[in-house]
Amino acid sequence: MSTRLRAALPIPSESASPRLVVGGLTKTFKGHVAIADINLSLLEHEFVAVLGPSGAGKTTLFRCIAGLLRPDRGTVRLDADDIAQSTGRDRRRIAFVFQQFNLVSRLTALENVLAGRLGYVPMWRGCLRRFGPSDRLLALECLDRVGLLGYAMQRSDTLSGGQQQRVAIARTLAQQPRVIIADEPVASLDPNSADSVMALLRQIARSEGVAIICSLHQPHFARSYADRIIGLRGRVMFEVPVGQFDQAAHAQLYGAP
Amino acid sequence: MTPAQQALADLEAAERGVTVRRVRFWLVAVAIVAFYLVAGHLAQIDPGRLATGLPKIWRWIAQAWPPAIEEMPLFLQRTAETVAMAAIGTTLATVLAIPMAVLASRNITPVPSLYYPARWFLNGLRGIDSFIFALLFVAAVGLGPFAGVLGIALHTWGSSAKFFADHIENANLGPFDAVRTTGAGRLTTIAYALVPDVLPVLLSTTLFWWEFNVRASTVLGVVGAGGIGQELKNSMDLLDFPRLFTIIAVILVVVTALDQFSGWLRRRLA
């Protein structure tokens, strides 16, 4: 990674104050409680995995944190600002990686990465897709970081699933976020691509000083890559360092084998 | 007897005799036959009149030779008028359709309370044919192609906005969500995530509506809204068959050529 990109990224602070604090987050759909009273916090550099069966509320929780859903109750504090109800530019500090990648299929890889700059540039630039040289350089560096510099001008729907997810990660890097939320980022990928995407995310948490919270279907990915594991089933069942995620915790979350 | 054999025997017993299903089948069959009898009566279907009328058309066709070549420059000018009316009317309709389509898409409308009014408005425009709008505008702005342009524009506005809105409602909103989380505003998000997806569809349906409107607007001249239809009606009124069939031939050639051209262009956009 070039020094230029490193300089442009937020400098991690050495204080131990948490990067993201979620308090009492509750969301109900038509009388059905999806998540109830969720409390959790993330430190910078930290990679936290969220495990839980289908329908446990992982996606609801993540969409509430990212502002794609409005929670019924609760706070989302990012660097001490409550952003639970805020929209627009305030949201650029939280980046999102989706299971289905969600690239704009007819745009090139580079244009998709440049979407990460939309929270910084004036509106006319976004609407016309005309970015200045510094934004374009940053986007190319992000593509280089995920190993896809050579694909910059390729239409994103011609890339493989693993490549598309890496472009999506480059998009989050271009966003220079404080927190990255990854919702089942490897559920649609083959095992090799999945491993490289997980390794990339962990590396980003370490070197970029962002906090990453990542939901996963397969506990073994959580064991190999996460620092901490949160068990979710409508509410937080447990929260343990990765070494303490044992058979008992597994059974508590998914039911007895 | 195994449980499966028992189940089969029960099924067969239930299907014997007068079942609800059979009664329903015959009721529906009788209703369909009755519908067509009534519809035929209302439409005054009379094969006898067709038998006496057909020979007349054959005689006219026989009289149509030689074609009215000497008036070709006029016919071509009038046809060009029709094509131009359709092009301007369709373009105007598309430009007006874009904001209405955003308003009439449940998933991205900035003003949800206007969703139903927008849909009703578009259905209203769609429900009234260009022909009827043209009648109104001939009375309001006078004879000539301009009235036709306005008629085409209003009707096509409704049809194409509804089509775009349906397309947007079925679009994958994943990229839209992704761009929204980068901190982009609503308009930027639409421009960045939705427009690249929707634009080819927009262009290709606009071409389709243009081609459709050329065909539809050949008749607008009948109500005085300009174009080749006006010459067609004059010839019919004067029973000038060489002229009439020459005009029909010109329309056929131009419409076919446009079909081919717009089809080729639409394939290139896909």
Image (cartoon, rainbow, N blue to C red):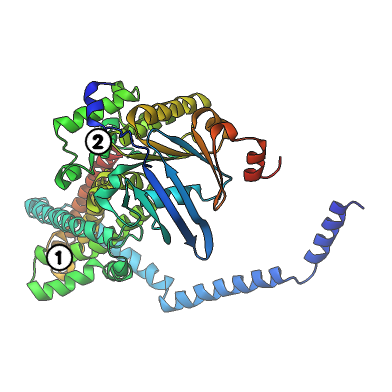
Q: Amino acid at mark 1?
A: Leu
Q: Residue furthest front?
A: A15
Secondary-structure class at tag 2: helix
Does residue B85 appear left or right of residue A18 in this picture? left
Viewer can see residue A153: no
Disc 2: which residue: A114
Could you say where residue A214 lies in the image, as x and y percent from the top left? 46, 38
Could you say where residue B31 lies in the image, as x and y percent from the top left? 57, 74
Viewer can see residue A1: yes
Q: Which mark is residue B150?
A: 1
Vertical position of residue A169 compared to residue B121: above or below: above
How many numbered dots are placed on residues in this image?
2
In this rendered view, identify the residue nearer to me: B61 or A109. A109
Residue drawn where x is 13% and y is 69% of the image: B224
Vertical position of residue A231 compared to residue A142: above or below: below
Quadrant of the image occupied by residue A211: top left
